[in-house]
Structure formats: structure tokens, C-alpha cells
Image: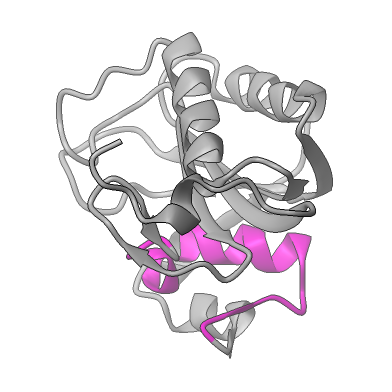
């Protein structure tokens, strides 16, 4: 597809670690995130290693909109990076995500943050995610799921504390 770098389409020889960010601010966000986590759990080429607690976060960029629920998954997968991206897009489609406005409200957002330290500047899939290092709504839940995580050699918790949106991230206890 579109001259993708071979590392983006090649299946790994053995399962690799990946970080997935989930977000929702339309509809039953808690239920939508539950369904997304369950879909990852049931996928044959994916094993969930850790699921972060949820965070309620203010939207960053884009139009005025409701707060988000965000969550991070740490997984092992034998899917290629592009295969994992396609899986996330199918989940978004299943949640009837509409892509009208950049950074606008959404039923489900599935972002591939990092996969096995692969780097890519391809417009279809940039890795690590190009803004992850400055987004506490991703970094904070990631640090809850994996306190020792690093991104480009910097502790994720440290990046989260420095992020402009750090004060808007609040842990949500599951009420289900």
C-alpha cells in the first residue's frame, strides 16, 4: 500500500510489544472502551499484557467538545505495524467513528503509539506516534500500565509530567 516501508508490512518473526491508545468522547464512552479492550482480548494475533486505568481528560486541539475517556493497552502481537493499524481502524468503523473534523469528537479513537521501537515517517503510519511525547492523555495512562516505560529513551512518566495537558488528566475508577 502506498509504497509502505517493508518494516511496516512485514509480520514479525516472533510477537512484539506494542502500545495502543484508546479514546472516546461520544456515546457510551466507557462501554465503547470496554468493547475495544474486549476486541483486542479476542483477537487471535494479539495478547494483552496490561490495561491502564481510565483517565478523564480535556480535549487537546480541535473544536470545543466533551471531555474524553482515555486508556492505554500494552500488547504482544504477531501483526505487522500496518496490520495492527488496520485492526484499529476496523474497531473505529465498528464504533461508527466519523472523521469530519481533525481532532474533533469521536466515538472511538485507536492510535498505535509504539511498536517494537519501529520508526517510520510514512504519512500513513508515523512511529512512534508523532505527538505522543507531548500528550499527557496518552502518557499518563501508559505510565499507569507500565511505570518503567520509556519513549525515545525518556521515562514516560517524566514526559507526562512535562506535558501541557498534564493538569487535565484525572484517573477514573471503574464504576461498572
Q: Which quadrant of the view contains residue 146? A: bottom right
Height in image: 135 above or below 73? below
Indicate yes or no whether the magenta region holds residue 149: yes
In the image shown, does 91 or 83 lie closer to the viewer?
A: 83
Height in image: 156 above or below 27? below
Q: Which quadrant of the view contains residue 100? A: top left
At 26% from the left and 46% from the top, the residue drawn is: 3
In the image shown, does 68 or 50 lie closer to the viewer?
A: 50
At 73% from the left and 63% from the top, the residue drawn is: 144
Q: Position of residue 147 (x, y in %)?
A: 77, 74
In the image, taking residue 150 as reference, residue 152 lies left or right, namely: left
Query: What scheme was used to colour the molecule?
Result: one colour
Can residue 72 be seen here? The reply is yes
Q: Position of residue 102 (x, y in %)?
A: 17, 38
Range of the magenta residues?
Answer: 129-152
Question: Number of callouts in the render?
Answer: 0
Can residue 176 be seen here? The reply is no
Give the quadrant of the N terminus: top left
In the image shown, does 70 or 127 lie closer to the viewer?
A: 127
In the image shown, does 125 or 57 lie closer to the viewer?
A: 125
In the image, taking residue 172 as reference, residue 159 lies left or right, namely: left
Indicate yes or no whether the magenta region holds residue 144: yes
At 46% from the left and 26% from the top, the residue drawn is: 108
Q: Position of residue 42 (x, y in %)?
A: 80, 22
In the image, taking residue 32 as reference, residue 106 lies left or right, namely: left
At 40% from the left and 10% from the top, the residue drawn is: 96
Height in image: 79 above or below 29? below
Height in image: 147 above or below 60? below
Q: Which quadrant of the view contains residue 173? A: top right
Give the quadrant of the C terminus: top right
Q: Position of residue 106 (x, y in %)?
A: 35, 26
In the image, taking residue 171 as reference, residue 66 lies left or right, namely: left
Amino acid at each position: 500500500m502506498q509504497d509502505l516501508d517493508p518494516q511496516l508490512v512485514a509480520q514479525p518473526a516472533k510477537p512484539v510489544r506494542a502500545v495502543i491508545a484508546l479514546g472516546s468522547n461520544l456515546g457510551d464512552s466507557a462501554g465503547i472502551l470496554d468493547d475495544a479492550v474486549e476486541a483486542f482480548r479476542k483477537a487471535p494475533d494479539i495478547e494483552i499484557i496490561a490495561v491502564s486505568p481510565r483517565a478523564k481528560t480535556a480535549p487537546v486541539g480541535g473544536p470545543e467538545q466533551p471531555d474524553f475517556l482515555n486508556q492505554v493497552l500494552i500488547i504482544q502481537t504477531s501483526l505487522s505495524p500496518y496490520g495492527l493499524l488496520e485492526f484499529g481502524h476496523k474497531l473505529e468503523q465498528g464504533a461508527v467513528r466519523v472523521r469530519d473534523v481533525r481532532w474533533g469528537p469521536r466515538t472511538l479513537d485507536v492510535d498505535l503509539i509504539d511498536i517494537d521501537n519501529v520508526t517510520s515517517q510514512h504519512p500513513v503510519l508515523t512511529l512512534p506516534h508523532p505527538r505522543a511525547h507531548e500528550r499527557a492523555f496518552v502518557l499518563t495512562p501508559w505510565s499507569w500500565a507500565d511505570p518503567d516505560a520509556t519513549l525515545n529513551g525518556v521515562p514516560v512518566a517524566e514526559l507526562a509530567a512535562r506535558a501541557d495537558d498534564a493538569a487535565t488528566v484525572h484517573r477514573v475508577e471503574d464504576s461498572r
